[in-house]
Image (tube, rainbow, N blue to C red):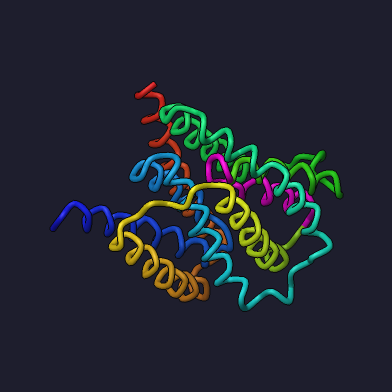
Amino acid sequence: MSDVWSVALLLGGIVLLGASVQRLTGMGFALVSAPGLVLLLGPAQGVVLSNFAAGTISAIGLAGSWRRVRLASMLPLVIAAGCTVPLGSWVAERLPEPWLLSGVGAAVCVAVLFVMRGVQVPALRARRGAVAAGAASGFMNSSAGVGGPAVSLYALDAGWTAAEFLPNAQFYGVVVNILSVASKTPPHLTTPAWTTTTAALVAGAGIGRFLAARTPEHRAKTTVLWLALAGGTVTLAKGLWTL
């Protein structure tokens, strides 16, 4: 098997895993897949592909739940994210690869640990919390591909239930990832790589939906977070090793 197809199949596997957990829990594509995509494609290409894929799988999930989106609550988040996405892209384009690898890995690890511990940040409450969370999320999404945890922490402090969080997180994922992709050069992938990525997104959406009806929510989220922590640790280690 040629190297092109080997990379394409490995890429498809990473995207399949991320798409499955995103559809299963409403979050987690970037946390699970961004470290692997960055290691496989490099920081710049890996992050932009993570943004593209995360936005796509969020759109698939949103198709059946858009009526439950709280537009008034989401507006401060998306406006704030839109202001910081260009800054994140600017930083990512100018940092050397070892620093970007270290930054992506560290961002994933810190975000996961915050979510695991259920850290509540009083400053993230009310409208000012939405603005702060959106600004942090937009910057992290465009620079490291991991914007979800900041929104998750905001939702936790705002007292949102899982049923309220899922459609709004998917709506936010669509918007912030469109902004992130638009601020960067599109990923340069081979035809086999695009083929496996597209197939993996579709298959992952189906697998995640199937598992969602059969997996307890707390168990699914715990698995996602441990996978994300492992990937972030490996990425951080590689970045520090190559500094």
Classify residue 61 as left or right of residue 152.
left
Instruction: Decide: is 125 above or below 104.
Output: below
Q: Quadrant of residue 162?
A: bottom right
Classify residue 89 as left or right of residue 223.
right
Q: Residue furthest front?
A: 185
- At a point 40% along the width and 59% down the height, the residue shown is 15
Count of numbered badges drawn on the protein = 0
- At a point 73% along the width and 54% down the height, the residue shown is 78
Magenta extent: 142-159
Q: Is residue 189 magenta?
A: no
Q: Quadrant of residue 68?
A: bottom right
- At a point 61% along the width and 45% down the height, the residue shown is 115
Instruction: Decide: is 130 above or below 211.
Output: above
Percent from the top left, x then y, of residue 188? 38, 52
Quick one: 195 or 199, which is closer to the camera? 195
Q: Quadrant of the C terminus?
A: top left
Quick one: 210 or 82, which is closer to the camera? 82
Instruction: Decide: is 199 above or below 3.
Output: below
Q: Is residue 143 magenta?
A: yes
Magenta residues, dominant SS class: helix
Percent from the top left, x then y, of residue 155? 73, 53
Percent from the top left, x then y, of residue 235? 40, 36
Q: Residue furthest left?
A: 1
Q: Quadrant of the N terminus?
A: bottom left
Percent from the top left, x then y, of residue 203? 40, 72
Instruction: Decide: is 143 above or below 6.
Output: above
Q: Residue furthest top?
A: 243
